[in-house]
Image (cartoon, rainbow, N blue to C red):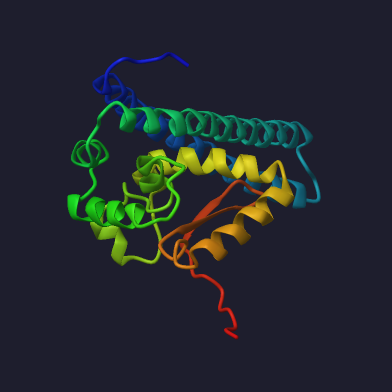
Amino acid sequence: MKTFDTKQQYADLIAKYRYDIRMTITLREQSRLYHDKFTKYLDIEKSKIFKNQYYVKELSEAVSQTNEYSTRAKNVLANYGKYLFCILAEYEKNGATDHEFAQLINCNMEKMEKYRQEYNGQKELSHSFFVEAILIHQAELPLVREKECFISVISELPLYAAMNAYYMQLLDSSPMLKEATYDALEDINPKLREGQFVVQEEENGSITVDKYYPPLRLLN
């Protein structure tokens, strides 16, 4: 990854990533739509007594191809997310203010100030505030969406989508790391995940995004 000397260059890169990530999300969504469409046609054709084997073969190839496109797009998102962890941290280190960051990602300044207060109140600050604002607080989320129980368009959170894809990729590579991460998160700050959203991907590639509700825990 290239090294930039000024915060403006980092800001320009982040803005470019937001655009590119949205395009990647759109391509992935289109791939899933076509995948579902071809799968439906394939199931219908296979259910017929007299099947058109040529049509079955074509549809099977289309299902496989669209699934491959969706997987590639997912990996591209994760790759963007990998670099964003570094880019956001460097943008902050190079003197970017909370106000500049809020403007860059279209975040309400009152929200950003609230996130900063919570961040400064933590005992250990071993990570970037800008990273936490995106990954933990979903700072890109428009105010109107905060009143809803789900996000209808994940492209409204491009930076979060990419960073979450990379983070989930890391956790999926190690079940033990995944379990330890969730346990540590819950023990350190039980309220930390209350404002988060859960992104679930089904076997057919469809994605649902729901508000996270932490499990009830017995108090001694």
Of residues 181 and 66, which is closer to you in this image? 181
Give left or right: position of 203 versus 196: right
The quarter of the displayed image where residue 134 is located = top left
Of residues 117 and 88, which is closer to you in this image? 117
- x, y percent for residue 205: 60, 46
Please give the name of the residue rendered at 61% of the width and 34% of the height, measured from the top-left corner. 71
> Tag count in the figure?
0
Where 1 falls versus 215 (above or below)? above
- Residue closest to the far bottom: 220
Please give the name of the residue rendered at 24% of the width and 47% of the height, measured from the top-left corner. 107
Of residues 168 and 65, which is closer to you in this image? 168
Give left or right: position of 55 versus 84: right
Where 191 falls versus 114 (above or below)? below
Please give the name of the residue rendered at 47% of the width and 62% of the height, measured from the top-left corner. 193
Where 185 falls versus 158 (above or below)? below
Please give the name of the residue rendered at 78% of the width and 43% of the height, measured from the top-left corner. 51
- x, y percent for residue 169: 62, 40
Which quarter of the rendering shows the C terminus?
bottom right
- x, y percent for residue 123: 43, 55
- x, y percent for residue 29: 48, 41
Give left or right: position of 5 versus 202: left
- Residue closest to the far front: 123
